[in-house]
Amino acid sequence: MAEKLEPAKVLYCGVCSLPAEYCEFGPDFGRCKPWLIDNAPDLYPDLLKEANEKATDNVSDKLQSVGISSGGADAATSSSQTGTSKKEEVKRLPGGKLKKKERQEVIIEKVVRNKRKCITIVKGLEQFGIKLSDASKKLGKKFATGASVVKGPTEKEQIDVQGDIIYDIVEFITDTWPDVPERSIFFIEDGKKVQAG
Amino acid sequence: MFKKFSLEEVSSQNQVKASVQRRIRQSIQEEYPGLETVLEDLLPKKSPLVVVKCPNHLTLVVVNNVPLFFCIRDGPYMPTLRLLHQYPNIMKRFQVDRGAIKFVFSGANIMCPGLTSPGGVLDEEVDTERPVAIYAEGKQHALAIGFTKMSAKDIKSINKGIGVDNMHYLNDGLWKMERLD
């Protein structure tokens, strides 16, 4: 009985680093699913079925809608192609990587700093091609307060303006940078209430 | 136990003398006879053994920047889950039922009913104050490492209260720290 113990090889999920069978208890099963379908299909056989069902649903929906509106065989085939290619694209991205939810919007938030002092946080201006350092200078000048560019918890940067300026800020943004439509500005009121402008 | 554990929690790191190293090897050898053959590879005599001290009387045994064992105060040395996954048969096994899994995942201690219910398995020989591996109903790999608060017989008969303390579980601070550097 003096044989050497061989270490067992464990398949750890690439997304959550847990053994693959525990992914459903991990932090984000949704992200693990595509990885699991590729690497450990036998552990979650229902996932494969789910994915297939979804795919066929999507394609049949697209076919139906295009068929009704234009009724051409060409249109139908092209839509099915785009349907599958879109699914393939979507599948390839989250194969381990985060799917970026790119929505162009400006988020304005008010955070209380002391009992009577607060700061206004403007996030998302860079998505409209606005240079944050310029924007913060303009904001500070206009409202006669301090404004600075701050790095958020992710790589995202935001502009902190001292004081409560949400009343005027919408007008100012749309005036100075006409590229920014008013409907893409949101306030945060206890969870993203779509208070457009 | 390791709910919050990061590099900042480390209070000191020391490479230990050969005598201390020998003592650690000996206690691990007594505790886990199953590891005897591989102990040479895991804790080679020549390689520098680093002992990392952390708050709460916690000591980690680290080889090549990889934590292998830990112990509380002067208690028994317990393997990290990563090590246990590689050598599953060195510790006694307890199994909890499915409903308990998500609580264990957030660090909860294991209550007796979780072990005595239909999904749970108890190893009768286990005494109190011993390290055990916790497995889950329907899963192949260890879920957590615990320290029994009651012997298996007591757990079965009394069936109330905390049966096993949850020392180290999947996705806790120690699990996330595969390497210390």
Image: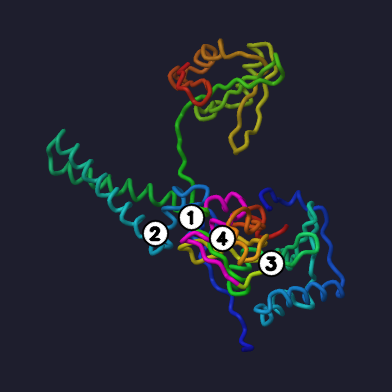
Identify the residue at horizontal 56%, vertical 10% (top origin).
A167
Callout 4: SS: strand
Vertical arrangement, residue B38 with respect to residue A78, above or below: below
Residue A12 appears at what percent x and percent y?
A: 52, 62
Have a look at marks 1 and 2 and say if they share a chain: yes
The amino acid sitting under disc 2 is Tyr
Label 1 Cα crowd, 10 Å radius (few <14 / some 14-19 / many 20+):
many
Question: Could you tell me how far apart the alpha carbons at marks 1 and 3 are, in whole angstroms?
Answer: 29 Å
Nearer to us of marks 3 and 4 is: 3
How are the colours assigned in the image? Answer: rainbow
Of discs 1 and 3, which sits in the foreground?
3
Tell me the crowding category of disc 2: few under 14, some 14 to 19, or many 20 or more residues within 10 angstroms, Cα based.
Answer: some
Q: Secondary structure at mark 2?
A: loop
A165 vs A67, left or right, is right
Callout 3, which amino acid?
A: Arg
The magenta stretch spans residue B16: no
Residue picked out by circle 3: B130
Q: Is residue A79 above or below residue B21?
A: above
On the image, the x and y values in percent for residue B120 come to 51, 62
* Crowd around label 3: few <14 · some 14–19 · many ≥20 (10 Å): some
What residue sits 55% from the left and 50% below the top?
B103
Residue designated by label 4: B143
Left or right: A29 as drawn, with respect to A168: left
Give the magenta-colored segment's residue range. Answer: B102-124
- Mark 4 vs mark 2: give the one in front: 4
Q: Are marks 1 and 2 in contact (CB under 8 Å)?
A: yes
Q: Are marks 2 and 3 on the same chain?
A: no
Residue at the spot of label 1: A23
